[in-house]
Amino acid sequence: MVSKFSTMKLSGSFFTGTVLALLGALLFSTKAIFVKLAYHYDVDSSTLLLFRMLMALPFYVYMIYRDYGRSAQQWKMIKPRYWWALVASSFLGYYLSSLLDFMGLQYIDASIERLILFIYPTIIALLSFIVFRERLRKLQTIALIVSYLGLVFVFGEHLSHISLSQTFWKGAILIFLCAITFAVFLVINQWVIPQFGARSFTSLSMTLACFFVIIHFLLEHHNHIKWPEAWQVYLYSLAMATLATIIPSYFVNTAIQQIGATRVGILSSVGPISTISLAYWLLDERLSSSQIIGAFFIIVGVSFVSFDLKRRASNKT
């Protein structure tokens, strides 16, 4: 009887985690759309990121205040290395990765951004091979080749004139660096989240990230601060703070706790499709035929890599 109830509870958690991962991926995919819409007005990347985080900050602070009574004793028992890992995760993921993403979106389309960013599971696999000396299986190697071949198709005509001075390549490099920091961020999260719990981890790490963003903004704009005049910038920032930050941050971290980062990575394959669709309807972005082929290769290759990562993780447990 106990086993039966345990199985029901486990399947319920898996279902909940799956739904939260899907919803989180869909909501996160709207971020690039809101950023591109805001860039139609006179606003730079650090200012837009500041608005996003400032509007989200009160909620995260409230959640810390709300959870402090229940979690204070638990937090005191957490070892210092996990606190430092939380700081590192916050810096890499919610600050640096977001900053690189916002900067890259100044130069490339939202649909291209999402396809480049989506290769982060392949980076996790490569990091496991380079850092942890984990062997790359034949299927995984083929999937990696397919994924990066997809990027070649996505870059398409830009490959004939590669130059760091060109805006497309500036954006592509920034988004690729964003994918690297995001991959490291996810690896750290899977190790740290169980120590704090998904909700506490999200509240603490996002609050820290908000302060990182504020410090960055003050250092960059210490001589002159110019606030955007267009009200649309503030509206899109509010949409980013709620729909593309607060809600999906709790959804995804809870999903990671319940079903693991690798399964979340697999389910996030809906993200590029969602972003490409929204970019088509709201931004009038069009992928070329070679980029559509590249998108297919990337989604298939990354999905295979994610499945293999999940299988290897399951074999270890």
Image: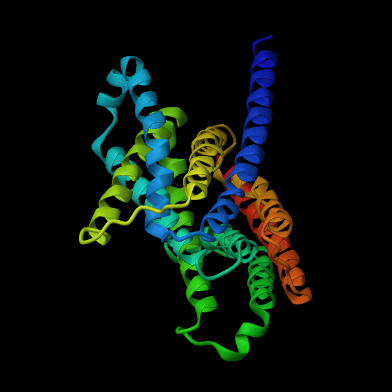
Q: Please determine whether, in this image, residue 73 is positioned above or below residue 192.
A: above
| Residue 222 horizontal/vertical position (percent) | 21, 58
**Is residue 105 among what the camera can see?**
yes
Looking at the picture, does residue 21 appear above or below residue 266?
above
Q: Quadrant of the N terminus?
A: top right
Residue 271 screen position, x and y as percent: 65, 51
Q: Residue at x 34, y 41 (%)?
A: 86
Whether residue 133 appears in this view of the structure is no
Query: Percent position (x, y) of residue 181?
Result: 43, 58
Image location (x, y in percent) of residue 151: 64, 73
Residues 149 and 259: in front is 149
Residue sitting at x 56%, y 69% = 108
Left or right of 229 on screen, residue 281: right
| Quadrant of res 137 | bottom right
In the image, 149: left or right of 98? right
Q: Is residue 165 depicted above or below 277 in this figure?
A: below
